[in-house]
């Protein structure tokens, strides 16, 4: 008989019968140039342990960039597609979406940068939890059609994991140093003086 491979075990159940899940993101995304991140500390799952957190700091003088949309909308969101590698390992395609509008030079420069760069995206749920997308390998702009007239003045841009380099884990939960300043860090766009 072959030896059974155990890479993950279920550690608990989940009771959502009386506690409905959080279902909405604040309509704000903080997009960070991956190259601006100085240090990253991931605490990830291992057999018998369930950890899904990330702490990071940006290089001195660097900041993330906030994309704001009306709170009544649903343009800002995070998604994950679970797939398997050719070797049978689970992998995750992270997708972070936010709205870009306008036709001015500043909008064109933003769109051009989003199509050429590598990014990490922070999204905040309405319970205050900050999720981090693309922390391992970065995200890049998915294909899009920018149609100002038919698109309501803009387009929901999706920054996705590259097909050749998906993430090994689900999006992580941001933890700050010192602890308890997660929302303040998000609100300041993770800026470093």
Image (cartoon, rainbow, N blue to C red):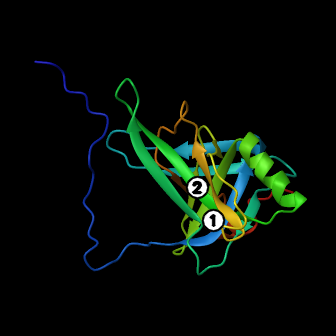
Q: Residue at x 39, y 25 (%)?
A: 86
> Percent x, y for residue 19?
33, 78
Q: Name the residue under label 2.
A: 96
Query: Taking 61 as reference, is 125 left or right?
Result: left
- Distance, label 1 to label 2, CA atoms, is 19 Å
Work out which residue is located at the far top of the displayed protein and give it.
1
Q: Quadrant of residue 147?
A: bottom right
Residue 71 position in % (x across, y down): 62, 79
Residue 15 in view, yes or no: yes
Q: Where is residue 90 in the image (x, y as percent from the top left)?
A: 38, 36
Q: In which quarter of the image is residue 70?
A: bottom right
Task: Examine the image and state in which quarter residue 106 appears.
Answer: bottom right
Quadrant in which the N terminus appears: top left
For residue 68, which numbered disc appears in the image?
none
Question: Judging from the image, what secondary structure is the residue with disc 2 in?
Answer: strand
> Earlier along the polypeptide chain: callout 1 or callout 2?
2
Single out the residue that lies furthest toward the left.
Answer: 1
In-image side of 37 versus 52 (left or right): right
Q: Label 1 crowding class (10 Å Cα cut-off): few <14, some 14-19, many 20+?
A: many
Residue beneath the point at 58% across and 76% down: 73
Above or below: residue 171 compared with residue 98? above
Which label belongs to residue 182? 1
Estimate the x, y position of residue 117 in percent, counting from the top left: 74, 41
Give the left or right position of residue 161, taking residue 1 as reference. Answer: right
SS category of the residue bearing label 1 = helix
**Residue under the image location 59 percent in, 39 percent down:** 136
In this rendering, the answer to whether 92 lies above or below 85 is below
Foreground pick, 98 / 26: 98
């Amino acid at each position: 008989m072959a030896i059974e491979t155990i890479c993950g075990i279920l550690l608990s159940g989940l009771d959502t019968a009386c506690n409905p899940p959080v279902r909405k993101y604040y309509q704000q995304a903080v997009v960070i140039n991956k190259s601006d991140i100085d240090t990253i500390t991931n605490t990830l799952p291992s057999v018998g342990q369930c950890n899904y957190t990330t702490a990071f700091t940006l290089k001195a003088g660097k900041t993330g960039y906030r994309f704001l949309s009306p709170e009544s909308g649903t343009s800002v969101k995070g998604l994950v597609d679970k797939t398997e590698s050719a070797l049978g390992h689970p992998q995750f395609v992270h997708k972070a979406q936010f709205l870009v509008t306008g036709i001015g030079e500043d909008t064109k420069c933003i769109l051009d940068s989003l199509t050429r760069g590598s990014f990490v995206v922070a999204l905040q749920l309405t319970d205050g939890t900050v999720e981090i997308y693309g922390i391992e390998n970065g995200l890049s702009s998915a294909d899009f059609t920018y149609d100002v007239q038919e698109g309501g003045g803009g387009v929901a841009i999706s920054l996705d994991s590259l097909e050749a380099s998906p993430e090994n884990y689900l999006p992580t939960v941001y933890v700050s140093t010192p602890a308890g300043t997660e929302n303040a860090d998000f609100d300041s766009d993770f800026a470093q003086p």
